Amino acid sequence: MFQFTEDCILGLTEIDQEHRELFALINKVADMLKNHYLPDRYEDIKDLLEELERYAEQHFANEEAYMESIRDPELILQRSQHVAFRDKIRDFSLKDIDDENMQREVLEGLMNYLAKWLYHHIIGSDIMIGKLPPLEEWMIRENPCEFTEEYRTGIELIDREHQNLFEIIDKANILVREQVDEESLDEIMEILAELKTYTELHFGDEEEYMESIGYEGLQAQKRAHTAFIGKVESISREEISQNPQEYMQSLVEFLLGWLINHILYTDKKIPMN
């Protein structure tokens, strides 16, 4: 059973309720996989996929409308992720579920995709909704990537590594200000590789510290860290090359926004030893 736990709650009544519905849908998939007494599941799978499509249309429309109303800086990235979800569900709808041998394969693929989506999207993206200042208020700073006193946790190692992360993101931000084009792709990929490597190092150090002090929020932190690394790993050169300037602009906004949110609302709760 997939449980809607406290670390998935945004504090937004309608969106939280719709997220609960998605948990219920994935548990429905899990129940269908456990039931070996119905050899032909064509109608059940067809109904489930149609329900997922209806859910996506309603939920994403509500979520995007709310984000637009508060000028949330993650809106552009969220929209692209929502499109990807709809496309994936449609891909499942096109599978040959008349074939009983394919039905289990479709259900297993759907289950794996939804499970990954639940935690990566809700914890990695949705958890930030409404928690960041509107885009105009933090991206118009002379240097939005400056590591200022407000981001200090008081834990020397963590603060030093956070500062290094800001500096890596600033390299991407400088490219955006100078206009990104096809010729910048090699440099972009180098920066992203550096970001992934250093982020993995930082998360490892941070988790080791939290474990050493018996911090009760360690598991929620690990899930957030895994979701962020997954996002960085999913960035492809091909996707960037389609519109490098626009893509990198939204990517910098996401990276910086996620880091600021994670420090202010999560890491600052970690007690000093």
Image (spheres, rainbow, N blue to C red):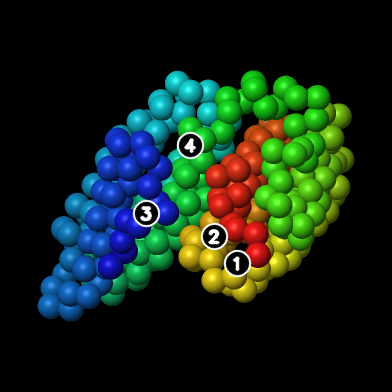
Residue 210 numbered mark, or none: 1
**Which residue occupies the foreground of this view, 49 or 167?**
167
Viewer-closest of 16 and 113? 16
Instruction: Identify the amino acid type marked 2.
Output: Gln
Q: Residues within 10 Å of mark 1 (few under 14, many from 20)?
A: many
Residue at disc 4, secondary structure: loop
Distance Cα–Cα, label 2 vs label 4? 17 Å
Mark drawn on residue 221: 2
Q: Nearer the viewer, residue 41 or 217?
A: 217
Describe residue 165's horizontal placement relative to residue 96 as left or right. Answer: right
Few, some or many C-alpha atoms within 10 Å of disc 3 (few <14, some 14-19, many ≥20)? few
Q: Name the residue under label 3.
A: 6
Residue receiving disc 4: 129
> Quick one: label 2 or label 4, which is nearer the N terminus?
4
- Using the numbered discs, state the Cα–Cα distance from disc 2 to disc 3 in whole angstroms: 13 Å
Q: Which amino acid does label 3 sit on?
A: Glu
